[in-house]
Image (cartoon, rainbow, N blue to C red):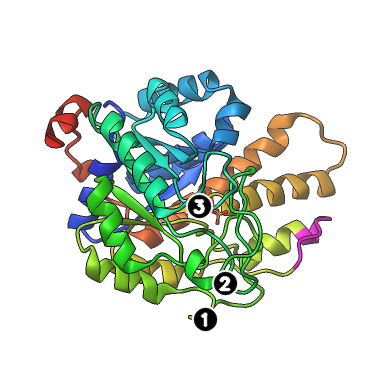
C-alpha cells in the first residue's frame, strides 16, 4: 500500500480512542525494529526524521529504506513524518522526498533557536498547510515552547530548540491561543508544550502536575475536541534501560521520563501522536554496551547490532500495546494522498 498521511492515521485513532507512537529514526536497524514490532502487533506506524536525521542519512538512504519498509510490510500503513521542520523550505523538501506528513515548528524562528511570536508562527504554519494540503500531506504545528518547568530552560534536540530561560507561560501552550492558532492555520495536528523536553534528562524526580502539566492537555482538548494533539519529548526513560547502560560502563545520571500512565491519560484527552526517540536510543546503547562488556573479543557489527535491534523492537512493541495502536493496522482503509488532497478543498 502507499504511504499514508498522518491525518488519516490520527482520524482513525481518534474514532477508535487510541494513540500512535511516532518513532524517530536515523538508520536501518531502527526502521527494521519498528516495522517488525508493527508486524508482530498489527500496528499502524509513524516513522519520523528530524532535520539532523535527514542530514545523517543523506535523505536518499532514508527514502530507499522507507521504500523497502513499504515493500516488505504491505499490510502495515506507514506515515513518514518530518520532525521539527524549521521553515516552509524544509517542509517542502521533505514532501519532495516522499514524506507524507510534515511538522512546521513555527514556535521558533528559522534559526531553530529564537522564540517566535504568535503572528510569525501562524504565518509560516499557514503557508505550509496550503502547500502540503494541496498534495494531501498532513501538517503538525506547535504552539508554546518545549522546555523544562523545573528549570525554565528551553529544550534542544539536534540543535533545534529555544535557548535560555523562559517564563512558565512561554513554556506552556495557552488554550485560547491554541484554538485561535488551529482556526487560522488549518493544521491537522497540534504539538502542545506541557513541560516535557527531548532527551533523557526530562525530570529530576517522578513528575507530578507541577512539572508535567497534563491539566493543560485536558483544557486544550476541551477547547479543541476535534484537533489531534501531539506530545513531544515523551520517552518514558525506563529505569531498566538506564540500569543496563550503567551496569555495562555507561554513566547516565539518575533521571525520569514521562510515565506511560500520563501518556494514557493524554490519549483519553485528544493526544493521538506521541513522540518517542530517547527510549530507542537507550535500548540500542544498552544492548551494544552489554555485548562489548561481556564479549570484548567480538568485532562483527552484526553481533552487537542484532541484539540492539531486538532491544529496540521490544520497546516499540511495548509502546504500541500501551498506546492502543496494536491490532489497528488491518482496520484502516488507506486512501492515496491524491484523494486526501480533495478533502481539504
Ligand atoms: P524523546 O527525547 O522524549 O524521545 O522525544 C522525542 C521527540 O519529541 C522528537 O520530536
Q: Residues within 10 Å of mark 3 (few under 14, many from 20)?
A: many
Crowding near the residue tagged with mark 1, few <14, some 14–19, many ≥20 C-alpha atoms within 10 Å: few
Q: Which quarter of the image is occupied by the C terminus?
A: top left
The residue lying at 21 percent from left, 49 percent from top is: 11
* Camera-nearest label, 2 or 3: 2
Above or below, 206 relative to 163:
below
User: Alpha carbon of mark 1 to alpha carbon of mark 3: how far?
Assistant: 22 Å
User: Which SS class for mark 3?
Assistant: strand
* Left-right relation of 278 to 275: right
N-terminal of the pair, mark 2 or mark 3, is 2
Magenta: predominant secondary structure element? loop
Q: Residue 276, how many percent across, how many down?
A: 50, 52
Secondary structure beneath disc 2? loop
Disc number for residue 276: 3
Q: Residue at x 74, y 57 (%)?
A: 245
Q: Please name the residue that numbered disc 1 is placed on.
A: 210
Where does the image place residue 199, in percent across and percent down from the top left?
62, 55
* Residue 240 visible: yes
- Please tell me how many numbered marks the rendered image carries: 3
Position of residue 51 relative to residue 197, above or below, is above
In the rendered image, which quarter contains the N terminus? top left
- Residue that carries the numbered disc 2 in the rendered image: 149
The first of marks 1 and 2 along the sequence is 2
Residue 39 visible in this rendered orientation of the protein: no
Residue at mark 3: C-beta within 8 A of ligand 1: yes
Q: Is residue 152 magenta?
A: no
Dots 1, 2 in contact, CB < 8 A: yes
Q: What residue span does the magenta drawing correspond to?
A: 246-253
User: Alpha-carbon distance for marks 2 and 3?
Assistant: 20 Å
Which corner quadrant of the image does residue 130 belong to?
top left
Amino acid at each position: 500500500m502507499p504511504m499514508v498521511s498522518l491525518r488519516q492515521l490520527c482520524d482513525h485513532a481518534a474514532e477508535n480512542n487510541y494513540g500512535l507512537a511516532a518513532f524517530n529514526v536515523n538508520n536501518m536497524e531502527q526502521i527494521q525494529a519498528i516495522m517488525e514490532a508493527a508486524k508482530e502487533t498489527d500496528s499502524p506506524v509513524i516513522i519520523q526524521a528530524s532535520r539532523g536525521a535527514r542530514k545523517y542519512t543523506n535523505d536518499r538512504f532514508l527514502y530507499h529504506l522507507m521504500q523497502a519498509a513499504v515493500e516488505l510490510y504491505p499490510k502495515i500503513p506507514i506515515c513518514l513524518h518530518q520532525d521539527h521542520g524549521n521553515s516552509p523550505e524544509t517542509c517542502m523538501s521533505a514532501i519532495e522526498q516522499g514524506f507524507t506528513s510534515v511538522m512546521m515548528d513555527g514556535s521558533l524562528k528559522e534559526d531553530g533557536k529564537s522564540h517566535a511570536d504568535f503572528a510569525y508562527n501562524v504565518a509560516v504554519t499557514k503557508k505550509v498547510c496550503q502547500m502540503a494540503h494541496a498534495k494531501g500531506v498532513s501538517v503538525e504545528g506547535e504552539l508554546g515552547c518545549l522546555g523544562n518547568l523545573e528549570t525554565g530552560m528551553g529544550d534542544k534536540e539536534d540543535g533545534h530548540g529555544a535557548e535560555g530561560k523562559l517564563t512558565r507561560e512561554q513554556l506552556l501552550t495557552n488554550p485560547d491561543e491554541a484554538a485561535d492558532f488551529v482556526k487560522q492555520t488549518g493544521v491537522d495536528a497540534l504539538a502542545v508544550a506541557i513541560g516535557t523536553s527531548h532527551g533523557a534528562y526530562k525530570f529530576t524526580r517522578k513528575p507530578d502536575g507541577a512539572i508535567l502539566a497534563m491539566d493543560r492537555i485536558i483544557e486544550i482538548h476541551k477547547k479543541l475536541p476535534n484537533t489531534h494533539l501531539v506530545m513531544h519529548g515523551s520517552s518514558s526513560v525506563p529505569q531498566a534501560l538506564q540500569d543496563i547502560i550503567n551496569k555495562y560502563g555507561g554513566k547516565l545520571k539518575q533521571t525520569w521520563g514521562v510515565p506511560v500512565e500520563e501518556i494514557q491519560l493524554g490519549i483519553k484527552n485528544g493526544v493521538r501522536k506521541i513522540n518517542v526517540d530517547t527510549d530507542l536510543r537507550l535500548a540500542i546503547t544498552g544492548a551494544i554496551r552489554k555485548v562489548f562488556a561481556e564479549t570484548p573479543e567480538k568485532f562483527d557489527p552484526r553481533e552487537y547490532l542484532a541484539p540492539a535491534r531486538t532491544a529496540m523492537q521490544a520497546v516499540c512493541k511495548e509502546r504500541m500495546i500501551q498506546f492502543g495502536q496494536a491490532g489497528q493496522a488491518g482496520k484502516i482503509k488507506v486512501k492515496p494522498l491524491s484523494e486526501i488532497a480533495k478533502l481539504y478543498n
